[in-house]
Image (cartoon, rainbow, N blue to C red):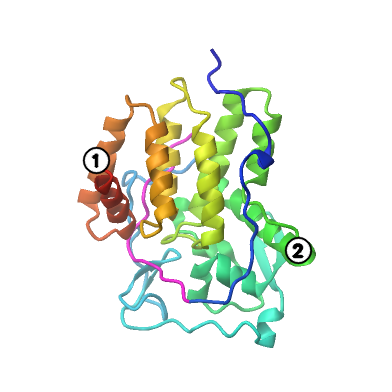
């Protein structure tokens, strides 16, 4: 029996959602700590354990009105961030030069501010260094690789108007892999890197349009799981979703319900124990508490 079920169809087998730029709004960023930690081979593991809260650096201006983490930076309480300029402001039409470890990309300021909302908490000038928004424990090679893919897609969207598919590369890996286990591992690694990069508290943040694509992809990825897949991959897939999970959105609650139903019963006690441990150890972590509360509401914990 193959360790991984054959991947049927390409990216078209799953519904895809195009990026459309709506009127600018105000992004709400919670405070708290990151959830989970990468433990797959080649990924960094913080010595403090899988649920590590980075110590706060000196307070900076801007940020959530209650203070806390946003984009991996601790902000002083009581100071509101500067609202983004209106969409018709001429200076927002000027492309931003995005500098990553793997190249330089020219993206629309509007696209960055909308789809990566944590960028609103810093002055977005002519140059943008997204790596600075990623908390150190999240800066795995897969995260930096995901950053290049994200901004390459945004650049292409600005230049051509072609739809930006967040997981086009992962779909291609699954379609072309001769070894199902290798294809699954590489696709899972890419997915976890994307979630690290778009972490709502220790990353760039994520628009609802991108979250729809994440929901669609992770459900399809978990459909490929059988009882021979290493538990580490299943754990990391679930905890990566927690970093972008929005409990106030019914669609995300349904996705979480589907993911939990796809996890083998033999692994659920271990995952429940880790979720409870995180919620107990990090009482002020919005990510940990929201995810644990959602699991309890659905009677999973």
Q: Nearer the viewer, residue 102 or 298?
A: 298
Assess whether residue 61 is covered by the magenta stretch.
Answer: no
- Determine which quarter of the picture holds residue 232: top left
Determine the secondary structure under disc 1: loop
- Report the span colored magenta: 26-42
Which image quarter: residue 81?
A: bottom left
Label of residue 301 in the image: 1
Callout 1 touching callout 2 (CB < 8 Å): no
**Residue at (69% x, 38% y) in the render:** 172
Give the spatial CA distance, label 1 vs label 2. Answer: 44 Å
Q: Identify whether 98 is placed above or below 214.
A: below
Residue at 49% from the left image edge and 59% from the top image edge:
134
For residue 70, above or below residue 254: below
Residue 290's mark?
none
Residue toward you, 97 or 11: 11
Residue 161: assigned label? 2
Residue at the location (37% across, 54% down)?
34
């Amino acid at each position: 029996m193959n360790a991984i079920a054959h991947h049927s169809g390409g990216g078209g087998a799953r519904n895809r959602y195009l990026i459309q730029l709506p009127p600018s709004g105000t992004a709400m960023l919670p405070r708290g700590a990151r959830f989970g930690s990468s433990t797959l081979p080649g990924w960094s593991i913080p010595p403090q354990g899988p649920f590590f809260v980075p110590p706060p650096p000196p307070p900076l201006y801007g940020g959530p009105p209650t203070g806390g983490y946003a984009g991996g930076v601790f902000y002083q309480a009581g100071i509101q961030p500067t609202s983004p300029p209106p969409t018709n402001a001429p200076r927002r039409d000027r492309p931003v030069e995005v500098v990553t470890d793997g190249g330089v990309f020219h993206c629309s300021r509007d696209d960055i501010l909308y789809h990566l909302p944590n960028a609103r908490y810093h002055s977005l000038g002519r140059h943008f260094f997204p790596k600075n928004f990623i908390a150190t424990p999240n800066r795995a090679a897969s995260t930096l690789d995901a950053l290049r893919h994200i901004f390459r897609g945004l650049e292409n969207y600005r230049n051509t108007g072609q739809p930006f598919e967040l997981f086009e590369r992962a779909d291609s890996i699954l379609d072309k892999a001769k070894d199902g286990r290798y294809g699954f591992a590489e696709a899972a690694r890419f997915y976890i890197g994307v979630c690290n990069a778009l972490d709502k508290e220790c990353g760039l943040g994520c628009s609802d349009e991108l979250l729809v694509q994440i929901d669609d992809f992770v459900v399809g990825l978990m459909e490929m799981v059988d009882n021979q897949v290493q538990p580490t991959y299943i754990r990391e897939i679930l905890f990566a979703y927690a970093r972008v999970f929005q409990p106030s959105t019914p669609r995300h609650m349904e996705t979480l319900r589907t993911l939990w139903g796809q996890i083998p019963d033999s692994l659920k006690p271990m995952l429940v124990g880790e979720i409870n441990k995180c919620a107990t150890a990090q009482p002020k972590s919005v990510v940990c508490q929201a995810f644990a509360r959602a699991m309890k509401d659905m009677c999973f914990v």
